Amino acid sequence: MSRKSGNKAERMNLKAMWNYCMFQSEGFPLMKVVLVAGTVGSAAVAYVNSFLYAGIIDSLLINNYDLAEKYVVRLVLIVLAITLTSRLSRQVFDFYSRPSEVETRKRTVKKAFALEYEELEKKDTLDSFRRVRQSGNSNGGIYYQLQDIYEFFIYVSQAVFAVIFVGVMLTKAALGKENAIVLLVSTAVLVAVFAGILIVCRKVSEYLGELYLKVQEDNYRINAQAAYWDSVMTIEDNAQDIRMYNLADYVIKRNKEMLRTTPAIVKMIVTNGKLRGMLAFILQLLAGVIYSYIAMRAVYGSVSVGDVLMYAGAIITLMDSIRNILDKKIRIEYSNEYLKYYEEFINRPNMHYDGTLPTEKRDDNEYELEFKNVSFAYPGTEDFIIKDLNLKLTVGEKLALVGRNGAGKTTLVKLLLRMYEPTSGKITLNGIDIGKYDYDEYMRIFAVVFQDFKLFNFPLDENIAGSEKVNDKKVEDVLEKVGLTERVAGMRDGVHTCIEHESANGESLSGGEAQKAAIARALYKDAPFVILDEPTAALDPLAEAEIYENFNELVGDKTSIYISHRMSSCRFCDKIVVLEHGGIAESGTHEELLKLHGSYYELYNAQAQYYTEA
């Protein structure tokens, strides 16, 4: 990288750092003032002290006690003012930066929920999310990352003040009449040595930065693998397969292979420590050169005793500032990597909330859904899962979508729920494109039990209500309807028992019990449209048919959609639609479709060996 491009990158990093501080302090418009006042004040106090102390000493040496007294008064007042300003700024910065860690995590999680559904199905989205979470935990978390930035600006300000002081010293010495040539030559040598050492320090710092990033990248990879293997060894569902197929030794072996990469990271960390030691030695060498220079100035009478004290303090602060700047620069460059991950994740497209229309709140549930010439291909593919599909669902109708795996049944539901947008055509609710409705309003009219439904590590009643605000009577009613009352009564904390064993008093539900709880959740929502998307696919056909028929009785006159690849499960429906190759092959009642001797007839008879007619 050329010097020009390198400088440009650094400017971009500094700008990103500033924007990061401003971003984390949204809602506090004075943060810029606080940041500037705090950094300048913290940097200036050391040099103001040195300057005034030098004046006091020089005044005392010439027996000018009045002048010394004035310097003392100025010292007390100025140092007090600067110290109070910098301390107050630091306290304010701390006050607003501490909550920023929580806020940033909240933004990250909220963004994950706001992403387009198709984004959530992409591997790079999940990788991006994991990187943001892990990077945000590095360097002590976001709060300490902000502290690094704040302190970096302080050290830069200190270095600027030090350069100004040294510049004044060099100018004063160069303008002296005694031994001017010696002074100028020595000054030139000092500048050359200073520049050379800074170049070496910068190169070492750049290498350290790359090494630090490499360590963090390897840590990310190892942590991700470790988390996976931990889950393999601890998740209850894996235990059966591990024991059945004697996989324990294999899992342990793979875990050890993952851990073998750790020594390489340790080696990089050791190298990092050695280079930091070398960097400290170089800076001490530079300090020695500058001290020698000042001593020579004092010998030639170019500087006073007070000046020696002032410049010695400036040199100490300058060396500390350079070391701290290089150290913070390495840490901040990694924070910039986090910021890059964060911005990339935050800028991913949200779900389309373009619509603003409210859905009608109808007591009669008079809603009509219609697919009009809908075609759909998943993003990045050219194969249409749905092709020119036309389908109308009227109020109170019981509709079954059946067909072989891959026929497009679940995809159709995802389109209906606005998880994806049609590639062409449109879906309407009461004649209006569903995209024009407010998303939350639109979702209010649906209750869905998905094929891969999830119950969360919450209390059972909150799982069913989907909220901490629970209607206890309503929960009792739906639990009774799905046949879970007796099971819940036997739980340690009743409906307040947490699901799964992650909680101290948690309990796990069997597969059938979990399905009933998921159905209870759908009933609790009391939405006009109810969808059952093969949540019983793991059950035998007779058990599935029983659950579907019971569910049909529970939803009453609500408009319902039942999805299954088993023909026997939906015989009770008003209309059965057979999907093939992305389109409607047949539609009608169970009896009508059997009489056609078409696709439904073939599928039904092919599955007849798994069940008996009622």
Image (cartoon, rainbow, N blue to C red):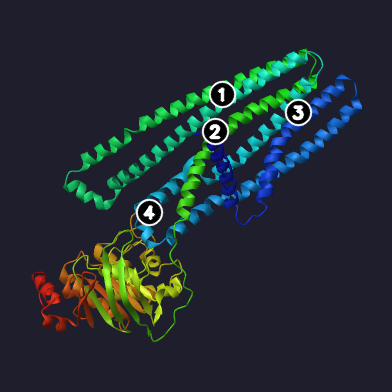
Which residue occupies 43% across, 38% down?
Answer: 216
Would you say the residues marked 3 and 1 are in contact, meaning their CB atoms lie under 8 Å apart? Answer: no
| Foreground pick, 556 / 279 | 279
Image mark for residue 50 = 3
Left/right of residue 171 with respect to residue 350 in the rendered view? right
Mark 3, Cα crowd under 10 Å, few <14 / some 14-19 / many 20+, is many
Q: State which quarter of the image contains the C terminus.
A: bottom left
What amino acid is found at the position of numbered circle 1 in the picture?
Ala
Depth check, mark 3 against mark 4: the one in front is: 3
Q: Earlier in the sequence, mark 1 or mark 4?
A: 1
Q: Earlier in the sequence, mark 3 or mark 1?
A: 3
Q: Position of residue 266 (x, y in %)?
A: 40, 29
Q: Quadrant of residue 402?
A: bottom left
Left/right of residue 161 with respect to residue 363 in the rendered view? right
Residue at the spot of label 2: 3
Q: Position of residue 608 (x, y in %)?
A: 9, 72
Mark 4, Cα crowd under 10 Å, few <14 / some 14-19 / many 20+, is few
Which residue occupies 66% across, 22% down?
Answer: 191
Residue at the spot of label 4: 504
Q: Position of residue 598 (x, y in %)?
A: 12, 77
Asked if residue 42 is positioned above or below residue 50 in the image, the reply reads below
Image mark for residue 280 = 1
